[in-house]
Structure formats: C-alpha cells, structure tokens
Amino acid sequence: MSRDGAPTGPWAARLALALGADRGMAALGDRIAIERGAGAGAGATRLRKRTSQPFQVLLYHRVAPSKLAFAIDAKPVEQFDRQMGTLARSYRVLPLMEILKRSREGTLPARALAVTFDDGYADNYEHALPVLRKHGIPATVFVVTGCIGTGVLPWHDRVLAAFEKTAMGNVRLPGESAEQTLQGTAERHRAAFRALAALKPLPEAERIAEVERIEGDLGASAAGSASRLMLDWDQVRALHRAGVAIGSHTITHPILSRQAPDRVWWELTESKREIETAIGDRVTLFAYPNGRPEDFTGETMTMLDKAGYEAAVTTTFGTNEAGENPYLWRRGTPWERDEARFALKLAYYRMFGAPSGAPRAGGSEG
C-alpha cells in the first residue's frame, strides 16, 4: 500500500480491482468524505458524512500520439484511451452544465464525473476527440482565446519550445547568476522545468521579459516551432458541433488575483464574447488560470456571476458535492499510467472532500 492508502504495485492493484475494491471505495465515497489540511491543525484529518451526492472533475491538458518530454501534462493517446474506457465502464460521465443543473434539482446520479481540458491545445481536437467519441464521453475545453488561431503560445510553452529546440550549450536560468549547461535532452529538460518553476511566481511583466530573454539566449529558431500547437477557431467550432462544451480560460492566462479589477473584467467578458461569437452559443463555464485558492478572490467570483458565468473550476484537489459553491469546483489531474491503479486511485480519491473549513454554501463569497 502507498502512504495515501491506495494499492501501488501493478499486481496488487489488479488483484484489488478484480475483487471489486474500486466499487467499494467509490460507494464509500458516495457516503463519507475525508477532509484534511485545514481546521484543527496542519495535517488534521476527519471523516464527515456526506449530505448530498458527490461528483469528481478531471483535468487534462494535452493528448499526443507519443510521450512528450517538453510538455506539461501530456497523455499518450493509448493511456488516454484506457482511462476513458475506465470512466465509461465505471462512472456516469456528464457535461459540467448537466452536473450543475442536476445538482440544483437534487437528481445527480451516483458516480457522477466530468472531464475537462485547459488552455486549448490542437491535439484536443486531433487526438482527444476521437477517443471521447469512441467511449461516448462528454467533455469541456477551456480555451485561452488570445492563443486561438493567433500563433501566440502560452508563456510556459514558449519556454519549453525554446529548451527543446535549442542548439546552445548553456543558458542563465531566472534568478541564477551561474549558467546552466544544456548537454543532452535530460539536462535541457531539467533546466526547462527549473526555469518554469522560477518564472511562475514572478509579476506578469517581469515574467514575460524573462521569457523573451530566454528565447533570445537560446536562439530565435527555438521559440517559433509550434505554430500548430493551439486550436484555431475552425477546430473550436468543430469541437462544439461534436458536443464538446467550450469554456473560457481568459484571453491571456493571467493570475487574476494579481490584476486590477478592470483587467479582470476585460479578461472575463471579452474572452466570453469572442467564444460566443465564434460558436454561436452561450458560454457559461470558466476555468481560473493556475486555479489555486490564492489565484482568484471573492471579487473574481462576483464578476463571474455578473458576466453571466454559472460555474468555475479550480485546480484545488478534492471531490465536489451538490449544493457547494459552483464557482469553487475542485479538480484533479489523472496521474497513473497503469489502468488498474488509475481505476483504484480514482475511486479512492472520490472519498476526499474539501479541506476542513473550506466554504460550502452556494453563491459568491468574499
């Protein structure tokens, strides 16, 4: 067993799955929530009887034909296919707006779950959509509209592309005085992700300046290699016609809690307008950039409500319950390559609710 209580070895996981451990854990998660982290003290854990039906939201980014080293959260097609097969067999995968509607009505079924994608990568259309169709899985894609059909990449992909393609032998990483050697793929990979970690907390203008400096130091050809990395509007419309919900992930992917109110309002409303104009349908779903509790505020949620959004997803770990604040829905990223371990951990983590003391009531909170 792992430290989190889920089987770790592939043989142990397959045996546990054959014995129905996933069904048992999922059923227990429908009745009991494990809450930990806040409240009585650091690391405190308590059990709580659920008062309403839980549901999970999964977060993906990319689905690619093969393993990608210089990418964040890229699932090979075969792995994604196995995971969607598990969901189709064991869960009621529903569109996010249906989950919201049925949560309000009190008709949410057992084992409800939703699938989402962030940023708007072209492989969501090219490789994820055929798998979703194969298994009858609905999904939501949250797009950064400033990257759709413009040739503009998210800042983290600019950094990764630069390190992947560079022929330079060294570079100075952000916040460091000594240069980092780049001999071979492994060193370039380590340096790229060290650079991302150093850049993430920087103020927006400083971060973009450092990204441009890194691109320049690594060679002009390093950053211009991924012109088809992001969706274009024809692909967004095709996803929508195929039944995939399109939500907003802002225009430029800023940390909203660090922005002036006028900038936040523009990011929320203009991205919504652009998507609605492109697909001819209402946009009611939003994903917070970065998505941690410190990345948005109560005022952000008030603005979302005023702008016409009905629900928003975070990157806070945990399961949700009907009746909770729909602007604070929690998500988790699938992690296991082995199908049995994926099924068992997904069921196990169904038991985890909000951190103790987290808000539960509906409505925007300050």
Image: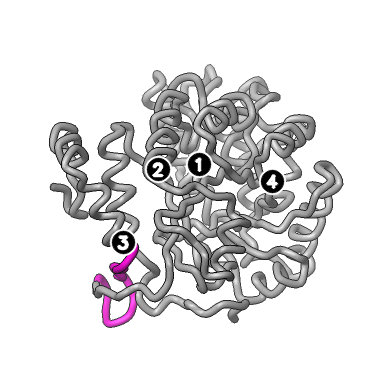
Mark positioned earlier in the residue sequence (3 or 2): 3
Q: Amino acid at mark 1?
A: Tyr
The Cα atoms of the two marked residues, 2 and 4, are separated by: 21 Å
Badge 3 marks a residue whose secondary structure is helix
> Residue 28 in the image: x percent, y percent?
26, 61
Dots 4 and 1: beta carbons under 8 Å? no
Q: Is residue 175 visible?
A: no
> Which of pointers 1 and 3 indicates the residue nearer the eye?
3
Dots 1 and 2: beta carbons under 8 Å? yes
Count residues near mark 2 (Cα–Cα under 10 Å), then give few for <14, some for 14-19, many for 20+. some
Q: Could you tell me which quadrant the C terminus lies in?
A: bottom right
Disc 3 target residue: 29
Disc 2 target residue: 334
- Asked if residue 39 is among those painted magenta in the image, a careful observer would answer yes
The Cα atoms of the two marked residues, 3 and 4, are separated by: 29 Å
Q: Residue at x 79, y 68 (%)?
A: 262
Q: Which residues are magenta?
A: 29-43
Mark positioned earlier in the residue sequence (1 or 2): 1
